[in-house]
Image: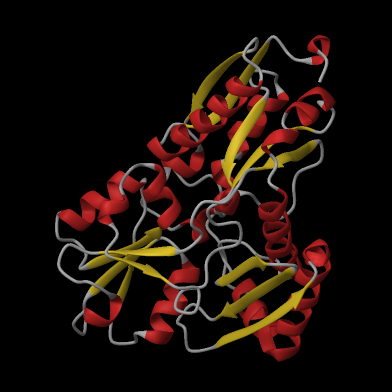
Amino acid sequence: MPNSSIPKKIVIATRESALALWQANFIRERLAELYPQTEISIFGMTTRGDQILDTSLSKIGGKGLFIKELEQALEDKSADIAVHSMKDVPMNMPAGFTLAAIAQREDPRDAFISNRYASLDALPPDSVVGTSSLRRESQLRARFPQLQVQPLRGNVQTRLRKLDEGQFAAIILAAAGLKRLGLADRIAALLSPELSLPAVGQGALGIECLTDRHDLIKLLRPLHHIETAQCVEAERAMSRALGGSCQVPLGGFAEITGEVLRLRGFVASPDGTCIISNELSGKPEMGTAMGAQLAQNLKMQGAEEILAALESVPTEPMSHP
């Protein structure tokens, strides 16, 4: 890339949680190695999703609350790029914005954390398990109906503190966040995709910029990890075709082995009494088409009835204090 087209300065917009700042600094360090002549700084912001901690995300408009302010910073030119957890990025990007790169995935699995028990199987009946996710909740309720599942909001440190205070017998978090924050020793067990199918995009980082910033799109290309992107794009295509959001308990997980992409997905009722799952395998470059086909298969199996029932449940207004 010719020096003349490399920006003198890049500002990265990010949420101010410890994990979001780790992710932004990780991308900053990668860019600094590639472009040592460029000044790269972090612009930390508090988003609506960070401010409203007493209500589940599914009731206040979903994970898009975590990135709206960051996109505003891109639009008003106070930042150049934004770094997101891919599982927080809405399935349809707003006009004028693009994901310029998807970085290599960290461990995509869910993690079981408990100070007293080694696994979900070891929990006594009526133990309280905390999770922020309808996806995890539906799978837990289906496989472990004897457990109580209660909502758990806040950043990683807040959730661990609530566990340590004895509010929960165990909590479920994304393994990637714990590993990135140096907290892997808190993981009692990693949950296989067979036990807890991950969220769409879980463990992957996305870098967003304005569509017309061709200089940044070219600059970010070395950070784009093809295999991760193929998997995440397949997962997102499935979720998009199902109208995926925080209101929909669904999981989607793709992995590439050799020349084959395997995509698994499910849609569930929140109480876990009905889980519809399916999977497809094919060429990695066909991932987006596979995602759309898998969504169609799930609908034919009865997912549409679940989705229709969920659509009739109102969300709380965005003006929630």
Q: Residue at x 37, y 45 (%)?
A: 155
Q: How many marks?
A: 0
Quadrant location of the N terminus in the rendered image: top right
Which of the pair 66/199 is nearer the observer?
199
Quarter-wise, where is residue 208 in the image?
Answer: top right
Q: Is residue 299 above or below residue 321?
A: below
> Where is residue 225 drawn, in percent x and y?
68, 46
Q: Residue at x 68, y 23 (%)?
A: 80
Q: Is residue 67 above or below residue 317?
A: above
Residue 271 visible: yes
> Where is residue 5 drawn, in percent x and y?
82, 14
The answer to whether 53 appears left or right of 1 in the picture is left
> Where is residue 228 drawn, in percent x and y?
66, 54
Q: Residue at x 76, y 43 (%)?
A: 94
Q: Is residue 254 above or below residue 12?
A: below
Residue 53 visible: no
Q: Residue at x 52, y 21 (%)?
A: 42
> Where is residue 320 drawn, in percent x and y?
48, 47
The answer to whether 299 appears left or right of 248 in the picture is right
